[in-house]
Image: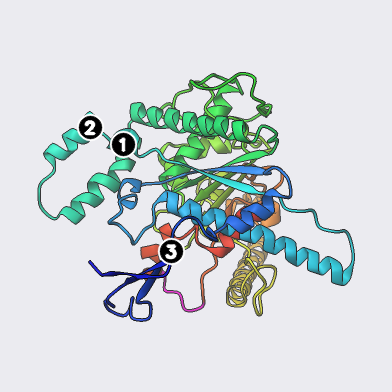
Amino acid sequence: PPPLLLAGKVYTLKLKPVGLKNTFSSTLQLQRGYGPYSYPGEAEESRLSSHGPPKEIIFVIHGIGELVWSKTEVTFVPSMIEQMNTLRIDIHKRQLKDYDDALKKHREEGGPEPASPQKIEILPIIWYQVWHTGTDIKKSLDSITIRTIPVVRTIANDIIFDVLMYQQKELRDKILKFVGEECRMLWSQYMMVNSGYEGDISICGHSLGSIIAWDLVTRLKEEGGEQGDFEGETRDQPRPTFKWGPGRSSMSEDSPSSGSNSLPAEPRNVWLMGSPVGLFLTVRDSHSSILSDPHFTLLNANTSLYNIFNPSDPVAYRIEPLQLPIGTPQSSIPPPCYVPTADPTFGSIDGVRAHLKAKEHMANASKKISEGVKIAEKLFGGFSKQIKSLGTNDESSEELERPSIESIDGDDAITFTLAGASNSRIDYQVQTSVLESELLSSITAHTSYFNNSDVVAMLTRK
């Protein structure tokens, strides 16, 4: 071990440089007792806490592979706890930056003074241990696993395994019950410390966690708002009132069965990150049931739904097309919105970076040209039929063509009720850089949502 040299009251640990990492930092200062120190995010949290009680709690549910990402030897993907610690700091920094910018604008231009921001709390929900820790299924899986190519076997047994298990109804119900109870337990503990909390809650799910979030909320809708009990909950704790609205759940016979109410309150927002919800709903044959109810909502109109995805994420799917007629041509499906930029950039328009805005204009121009050609063809075809009918006097040729699903025109003509009353769209696409490669980005796209500054800003501002 390196020698420890005494120099007054400060011990200096001499380190031998190894590679470039330690070349410029060969000493480490140690001291007795507690001296001045700062913990990342502490200053921002202290400042926000001085503005009053928190305004929102966001429960974040992890996705597949958390057993792997939580291992200390795995460093290329941070664990959910690490990601949430960073996300909490980033959200608090964004809250204060937005406030400082608004305050500066107020002082320079006048107008009403901006309200002081109240803290947003992030609480991760860890569920992977339910079937990965000491279960008979896991023991059986370990016994049948061939002892070769361990890295690939880990991908199958500890990552893809999560998806396979969630397809089993009994295990799915077990996970939903655990996640719901975990949310309620954390809520109960939070209320013990923050007894005056009267803010909102939101649910955020990443990857498979987004499926869990969807099923939890649709389960609430099935139950109609009956509040159950869970172990450790005290009845004298204040809890928000449930407000249930009309609508029909997309849960099929194979969907999670109803049980006790599993969330502490009606969520204000439901965030889906890198979500395969669209794929799961399609496999569950929910497209037709969603279409059958023109007023279909996720929970009710008070709950907003946001489906955020990176276009290079191979796991993510859209949701908006499920509220359009089956078979709607791709050209008639509105493109997804962009996640607005966190801060204005050079050339950006309405929160969209210049190169993407230019691409959007080109696509719109191309679509209008194509529509113009179709209109011209229909007009010419109708004129030709009229000429022929003069000679043949065939009344059948005068029949008007029925409008098809191709006649859907413009985003304004479509109402996505799943989005909620305060939001008009569901699908939001992360903005890519000018030189970004779709193929290379697909490697990291699925795990990069919580460190994306635009996504952080949207979570903060919504």
Tell me if 23 is positioned left or right of 434 in this view: left
The answer to whether residue 218 is visible is: no
| Quarter of the image that includes the N terminus | bottom left
The answer to whether residue 194 is visible is: yes
Cα gap from disc 1 to disc 2, whole angstroms: 10 Å
Q: Which residues are magenta?
A: 434-438
Earlier residue among tags 3 and 2 = 2
Examine the image and state in which quarter residue 353 appears: bottom right
Residue 222, how many percent across, how many down? Answer: 55, 25
Disc 3 target residue: 312
Amino acid under disc 1: Met
Q: Residues within 10 Å of mark 1 (few under 14, many from 20)?
A: some
Residue 420, how many percent across, how many down? Answer: 66, 42
Examine the image and state in which quarter residue 152 appears: bottom left
Query: Magenta segment: does it hold 436?
Result: yes
Outermost residue, left side: 147
Tell me if 374 is positioned left or right of 149 in this view: right
Outermost residue, front side: 8
* Number of numbered callouts drawn: 3
Report the mark closest to the observer, 3 or 2.
2
Cα gap from disc 3 to disc 2, whole angstroms: 34 Å
- Tag 1–tag 2 contact (CB < 8 Å): yes
Amino acid under disc 3: Ser
Disc 2 target residue: 137
